[in-house]
């Protein structure tokens, strides 16, 4: 299995960061780069065994990508795993972890274990380009996550009626 890890800091408290990531329907909000995700169904309540049924789109190419929640310990982490044969990878396990830095900052850590598709050709392509592609995709997700959560924090911090004063 290949391994990849990416972490970033969000200027938002743990409870807000957890709530955002704990909602699979938020995924399209952070997949704003060339790869888009569409969430079609989420088994609720979220718990180990819950399925999340999605479609991944890269340009004109669309691919079903269904995962199952393997572990969940709120608000510390959750792990999802591609259902065998129902996604773009031979195997995919993604742990989303969260650490408090202080009352207003949270570290988000994405840990991946995966096997690329297409056998030997996929392994060669992954060795040449995989980390570059993953790093770019997760950097884009980090920017979108920060933008989304930090704008929410600003909206909540604005005094009542402040929008009227700005007009």
Image (cartoon, rainbow, N blue to C red):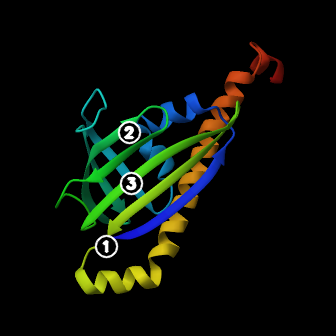
Name the residue furthest right.
Answer: 165
- Between marks 1 and 2, how big is the CA–CA gap? 23 Å
Callout 1: 10 Å neighbours few (<14), some, many (20+)? many
Q: Is residue 131 above or below residue 156?
A: below
Front position in the image: 161 or 45: 45
**Circle 2 SS class:** helix
Residue lying at 59% horizontally and 41% vertically, measured from the top left = 99
In the image, is 62 to the left or to the right of 4? left
Residue 94, disc? 3
Residue 155 % position (x, y): 68, 26
Residue 86, disc? none
Q: Which residue is mark 2?
A: 24
Name the residue furthest left.
Answer: 85
Q: Is residue 154 above or below residue 30?
A: above
Q: Is residue 14 above or below residue 63?
A: above
Front position in the image: 32 or 118: 118
Q: Is residue 21 above or below residue 134?
A: above
Residue 79 % position (x, y): 37, 46
- Quadrant of the frame with the C terminus: top right
């Amino acid at each position: 299995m290949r391994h990849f890890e990416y972490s970033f800091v969000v200027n938002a408290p743990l409870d807000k960061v957890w709530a955002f990531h704990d909602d699979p329907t938020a995924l399209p909000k952070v997949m704003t780069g060339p790869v888009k995700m569409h969430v079609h169904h989420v088994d609720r309540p979220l718990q180990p065994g819950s399925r999340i049924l999605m479609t991944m789109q890269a340009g004109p190419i669309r691919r079903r990508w269904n995962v199952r929640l393997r572990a969940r310990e709120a608000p510390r982490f959750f792990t999802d795993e591609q259902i065998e044969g129902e996604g773009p990878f031979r195997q995919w396990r993604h742990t989303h972890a969260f650490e408090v830095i202080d009352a207003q900052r949270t570290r988000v850590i994405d840990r991946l274990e995966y096997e690329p598709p297409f056998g030997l050709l996929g392994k060669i392509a992954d060795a040449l380009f995989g980390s570059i592609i993953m790093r770019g995709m997760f950097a884009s997700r980090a920017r979108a996550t920060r933008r989304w959560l930090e704008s929410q924090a600003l909206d909540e911090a604005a005094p009542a009626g402040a929008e009227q004063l700005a007009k």
